[in-house]
Image (cartoon, rainbow, N blue to C red):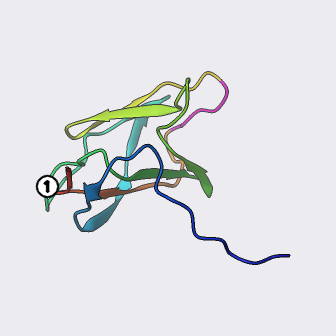
Amino acid sequence: MNQWVQTSGCGGVSVVGGPIAMEAVTITDVNTAAPLVCANGFPDGLFTMLVVNGMVFLPVGTSPPFSISGAQITWLSTVWGMNPGDTVAIAYSYGGTVL
């Protein structure tokens, strides 16, 4: 009981992850984020985590709360929202590849 059991990977996809970047996100209007700075490179989609006022959001599932393309975050959730003045940060991998 309460013992870790090794399992095979999910879905048979192998990835080579890149480094992780983290930056503050400015909310310019309701549910609208300013473009990311991406000083090290654009998010590669292998790992992305958005933190809004201490709540963690991941772009997964049938109705993800947000999507990201290049340097732009698009907020999709109809349950949660972002407002100017909220504390928002994003952590993402860049430079990784799917094998």
Number of labels in the image equals 1
Quarter-of-image position of residue 20 = bottom left
Out of 85 and 24, give the one closest to the viewer.
24
Quarter-of-image position of residue 61 = top right
Out of 87 and 5, give the one closest to the viewer.
5
Out of 40 and 27, give the one closest to the viewer.
40
* Residue at 46% in and 56% down: 9
* Residue at 19% in and 38% down: 70
Q: Is residue 41 magenta?
A: no
Query: What's drawn in magenta, residue-wise?
Result: 79-83
Q: Position of residue 8 (x, y in %)?
A: 50, 58
The N terminus, quarter of image:
bottom right
- Kindly tell me whether residue 77 is visible in this rendering: yes
- Kindly tell me whether residue 29 is visible in this rendering: no
Left or right of residue 21, residue 31 in this image: right
Q: Check disc 1 and report its element: helix, strand or loop.
A: loop
* Residue at 52% in and 30% down: 64
Left or right of residue 38, residue 73 in this image: right
Residue to which mark 1 is pinned: 41
